[in-house]
């Protein structure tokens, strides 16, 4: 028989019926639906927790990223944004001026403008582009071709004066930008060129004082932030840092005396068809450099056409064997050592003497000369006799104390030190030739500095480039008595009977020494190439100016220092003393020359 019991549903609870009771008439409900509800709720809760976890993770990621962007890499993103919508522009600082002792401007930077082009912004069909091209003085077709052929920003023109810059600014053409720049100008042109030097297109010093004083003259550039749109067109600006101008520098130079020296050098250069002429003028009381000129020179405002041979400051950079201009220092050392007196008679061997196998001669034969006459007549043989009693070490120490063999305090760019060999290496012939200015070399600056020892009371002053208030204490070299004695000798050397007679001045007694030296050539000396020089001071009774002149390789109208260099000294000294309003002495007159040719030379 078939069973009448219902099957058991898995997952449902069975209910036992009490004995003796009948089953309820209500239908019995299956447990399957209840179990599914519970499972569904559990699944839904699990998914919710999973989704919630994902949301929390996402929020945490967003929060973390936001914190990173806002706190950790804020600067980086600001810079990225700035690079897209901002452009930094340099605000150039004006360079300091160079002024002479009286405030006359020697070098100045003037404000100009340059034009920049942004090809991605500039529309070559812009209706006002033709006006822009006309302002610049260029054909419109050339301008359009340049813009089309250049994909990136470029500068089209520079050196625009303010009026043209204003005209371009008024056109308001997108893609055309104006920037300020400074251009260096030299009001005195070639007169100061070798000394002042010049700057490059970025207004940085390249030569001369412009280079030497760069740190002081150069200012600190400023910075401006330009706000640009997506096409790189500027529509706003904000100054971030102001430009700081460079400092002005007042120099010891006198523009008027410099003009005198330059004109005299130029005329001598042309007259004697020389390789070059240099003139240096110094205030003997202070060591202030008043003028330094070279011929030929150059125009510093035309820097694109420079000749390197004309740029060099020859008075500081070129070396020469001084010749007879060295004789007074040896005589002074001998006087200071009490070996001679100015009136001591010296044998000149009838114009010749032997050192080993070498013969030393004078151009004119003398029998005996006093020490004063040795200087006045410029006797080489007499100098050899005087130097015999001086130890080589004493001569060497005298020269080094006078600044030979080392640059001056001025420290000009490319300034030469000169050549002075240690005395231990001197042979007898070396000592002899050095006594009259051969076998060593010096610059004109060094010679002028050394001669201040005779223009003063035996003390030498260092050369200076900036003004000095009041007298300066120098370095003692010789006694005041010795300096006065040599000063008198130099007065006679520049008198009517001396080799420097053409240095005489109306109203002012002068003192100085001529020099004529063969130029070196292939390890020896050239027969027909000379350095003619004169170094002296004025007025001789109360010196104010020490002046040095060099004429390198004169080829016409003489070659001796007394012929070609002494007249340049006379002109520079006379005009300069008059400019300084020095009172002339009516009793001092130019006397006729009573000597023949110049000093003896090897």
Image (cartoon, helix red, strand yellow):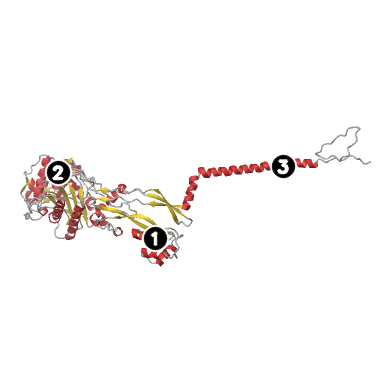
* Left or right placement of residue 167 versus residue 602 in this view: right
Q: Position of residue 11 (x, y in %)?
A: 80, 39
* Left or right placement of residue 402 versus residue 47 in this view: left
Find disc 3 in the rendering and name its residue: 43
Q: Nearer the viewer, mark 3 or mark 2?
A: 3
Considering every residue shown, the one lying at the far front of the view is 170
Q: Position of residue 568 (x, y in %)?
A: 15, 55
Find disc 1 in the rendering and name its residue: 170
Q: Position of residue 94 (x, y in %)?
A: 33, 51
Mark pair 3, 1: CA separation: 76 Å
* Left or right placement of residue 518 versus residue 596 in this view: right
Between 553 and 297, the residue placed more toward the observer is 297
Between 315 and 183, the residue placed more toward the observer is 183
Quadrant the N terminus occupies: top right
Do the CB atoms of the residues marked 3 and 1 lie less than 8 Å apart?
Answer: no
| Label 3: few (<14), some (14–19) or many (≥20) C-alpha neighbours in 10 Å | few
The disc, 3 or 1, on the residue closer to the chain's N-terminal end is 3
Considering every residue shown, the one lying at the far top of the view is 19
**SS at badge 2:** loop
Mark pair 2, 1: CA separation: 65 Å
Q: Nearer the viewer, mark 3 or mark 1?
A: 1
The disc, 2 or 1, on the residue closer to the chain's N-terminal end is 1
Between 102 and 551, the residue placed more toward the observer is 102
Find disc 2 in the rendering and name its residue: 456
Determine if residue 160 is in view: no
**SS at badge 1:** helix
Do the CB atoms of the residues marked 2 and 1 lie less than 8 Å apart?
Answer: no
Q: Nearer the viewer, mark 2 or mark 1?
A: 1
């Amino acid at each position: 028989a078939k069973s009448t019991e219902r099957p058991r549903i898995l997952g449902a609870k069975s209910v036992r019926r009490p004995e003796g009771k009948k089953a309820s008439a209500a239908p019995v409900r299956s447990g399957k639906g209840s179990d599914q509800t519970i499972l569904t709720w559990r699944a839904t809760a699990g998914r919710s927790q999973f989704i919630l976890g994902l949301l929390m993770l996402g929020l945490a990621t967003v929060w973390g990223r936001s914190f990173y962007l806002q706190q950790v890499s804020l600067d980086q993103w600001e810079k990225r944004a700035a690079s897209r919508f901002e452009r930094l522009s340099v605000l150039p600082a004006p360079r300091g001026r160079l002024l002479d002792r009286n405030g006359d401007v020697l070098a100045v930077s003037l404000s100009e403008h340059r034009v920049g082009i942004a090809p991605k912004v500039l529309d070559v069909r812009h209706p006002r582009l033709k006006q822009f091209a006309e302002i610049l003085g260029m054909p419109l077709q050339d301008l359009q071709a340049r813009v089309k052929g250049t994909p990136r920003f470029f500068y089209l023109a520079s050196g625009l004066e303010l009026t043209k810059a204003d005209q371009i600014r008024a056109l308001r053409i997108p893609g055309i930008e104006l920037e300020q720049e400074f251009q260096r100008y030299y009001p005195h042109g070639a007169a100061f060129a070798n000394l002042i030097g010049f700057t490059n297109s970025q207004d940085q010093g390249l030569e001369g004082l412009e280079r030497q004083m760069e740190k002081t003259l150069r200012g600190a550039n400023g910075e401006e932030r330009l706000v640009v749109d997506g096409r790189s067109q500027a529509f706003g600006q904000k100054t971030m840092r102001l430009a700081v101008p460079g400092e002005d520098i007042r120099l010891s130079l006198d523009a008027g005396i410099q003009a005198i020296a330059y004109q005299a050098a130029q005329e001598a250069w042309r007259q004697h068809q020389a390789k070059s002429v240099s003139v240096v003028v110094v205030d003997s009381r202070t060591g202030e450099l008043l003028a330094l000129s070279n011929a030929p020179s150059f125009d510093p405002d035309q820097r694109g056409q420079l000749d390197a041979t004309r740029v060099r400051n020859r008075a500081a950079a070129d070396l020469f064997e001084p010749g007879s201009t060295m004789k007074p220092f040896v005589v002074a050392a001998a006087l200071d050592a009490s070996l001679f007196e100015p009136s001591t008679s010296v044998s000149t061997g009838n114009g010749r003497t032997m050192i080993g196998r070498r013969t030393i001669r004078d151009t004119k034969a003398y029998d005996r000369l006093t020490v004063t006459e040795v200087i006045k007549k410029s006797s080489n043989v007499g100098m050899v006799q005087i130097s015999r009693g001086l130890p080589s070490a004493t001569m060497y120490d005298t020269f080094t104390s006078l600044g030979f063999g080392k640059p001056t305090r001025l420290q000009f760019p490319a300034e030469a030190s000169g050549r002075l060999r240690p005395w231990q290496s001197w042979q007898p012939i070396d000592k002899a030739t050095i006594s009259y200015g051969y076998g060593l070399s010096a610059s004109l600056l060094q010679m002028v500095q050394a001669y201040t020892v005779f223009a003063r009371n035996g003390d030498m002053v260092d050369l200076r480039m900036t003004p000095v208030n009041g007298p300066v204490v120098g370095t003692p070299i010789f006694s005041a008595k010795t300096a006065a004695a040599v000063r008198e000798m130099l007065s006679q050397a520049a008198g009517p009977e001396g080799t420097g007679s053409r240095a005489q001045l109306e109203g002012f007694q002068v003192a100085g020494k001529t020099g004529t030296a063969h130029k070196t050539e292939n390890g020896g000396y050239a027969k027909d190439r000379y350095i003619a020089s004169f170094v002296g001071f004025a007025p001789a009774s109360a010196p104010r100016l020490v002046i040095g002149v060099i004429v390198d390789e004169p080829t016409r109208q003489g070659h001796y220092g007394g012929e070609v260099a002494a007249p340049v000294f006379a002109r520079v000294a006379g005009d300069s003393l008059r400019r300084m309003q020095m009172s002339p002495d009516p009793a001092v007159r130019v006397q006729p020359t009573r000597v023949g040719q110049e000093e003896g030379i090897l």
